[in-house]
Image (spheres, rainbow, N blue to C red):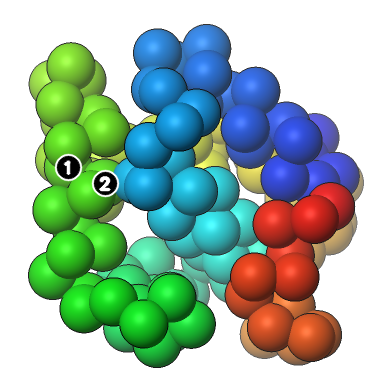
């Protein structure tokens, strides 16, 4: 069960992603957002836009950074994100947590990296 970004970071490191890459940072946020609100997976481009605004980047650069970070994986960005969400949040959802539209990230997306 995921209780914070530390578990997401551990998961990404186990998958062989480099902690120093920008894509790693973006993936932590995206996996957290989609894990808390699975409906956001259907419009992943909207999640990219949220993060792009917060980091003063373009959604295209977010996509490219993630693609570069997972280049050793044989999946698309969306497939990798969904696999991570499935593995990290499955137990949490089974216990009745994180359903529906929740208000996430009070204080902005960047502040969520602190946890």
Q: Which of 65 and 97 is in front in this view?
A: 65
Q: Is mark 2 on a helix, strand or loop?
A: helix
Residue 81 on image: x %, y %: 38, 45
Residue 42 in sight here: no
Q: Which of 48 and 1 is in front in this view?
A: 48
If the image is split into quadrants, where does the N terminus sit?
top right
Q: In this view, does 43 lie above or below 33?
A: below
Q: Distance between the residues labelled 1 and 2?
A: 4 Å
Q: Nearer the viewer, residue 85 or 58?
A: 58
Residue 96 on image: x %, y %: 84, 56
Residue 41 on image: x %, y %: 38, 66
User: Residue drawn 39% across and 22% down?
Assistant: 17
Residue 115 numbered tag: none
Residue 67 numbered tag: 1
The answer to which quarter of the image holds residue 108 is bottom right
Pointer 2 residue: 66
| Horizontal side of residue 97 vs 10, given as left or right | right
| Horizontal side of residue 14 vs 10, given as left or right | left
Badge 1 vs badge 2, beta-carbon distance below 8 Å: yes
Residue 20 on image: x %, y %: 45, 32
| Horizontal side of residue 52 vs 66, given as left or right | right
The answer to which quarter of the image holds residue 44 is bottom left
| Horizontal side of residue 75 vs 31, given as left or right | left
Label 1 Cα crowd, 10 Å radius (few <14 / some 14-19 / many 20+): some
User: Residue drawn 37% across and 47% down?
Assistant: 22
Label 2 Cα crowd, 10 Å radius (few <14 / some 14-19 / many 20+): many
Residue 80 in sight here: yes
User: Residue drawn 63% across and 36% down?
Assistant: 8
Q: Is mark 1 on a helix, strand or loop?
A: helix
């Amino acid at each position: 069960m995921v209780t914070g970004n530390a578990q997401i970071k551990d998961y990404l490191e186990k998958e062989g992603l480099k902690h120093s890459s920008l894509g790693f940072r973006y993936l932590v946020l995206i996996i957290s957002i989609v894990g808390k609100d699975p409906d956001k997976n259907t419009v992943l481009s909207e999640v990219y836009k949220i993060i792009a605004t917060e980091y003063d980047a373009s959604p295209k650069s977010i996509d490219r950074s993630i693609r570069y970070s997972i280049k050793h994986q044989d999946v698309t960005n969306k497939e990798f994100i969904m696999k991570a969400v499935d593995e990290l949040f499955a137990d949490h959802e089974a216990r009745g947590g994180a359903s529906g539209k929740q208000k996430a990230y009070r204080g902005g997306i960047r502040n969520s990296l602190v946890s």
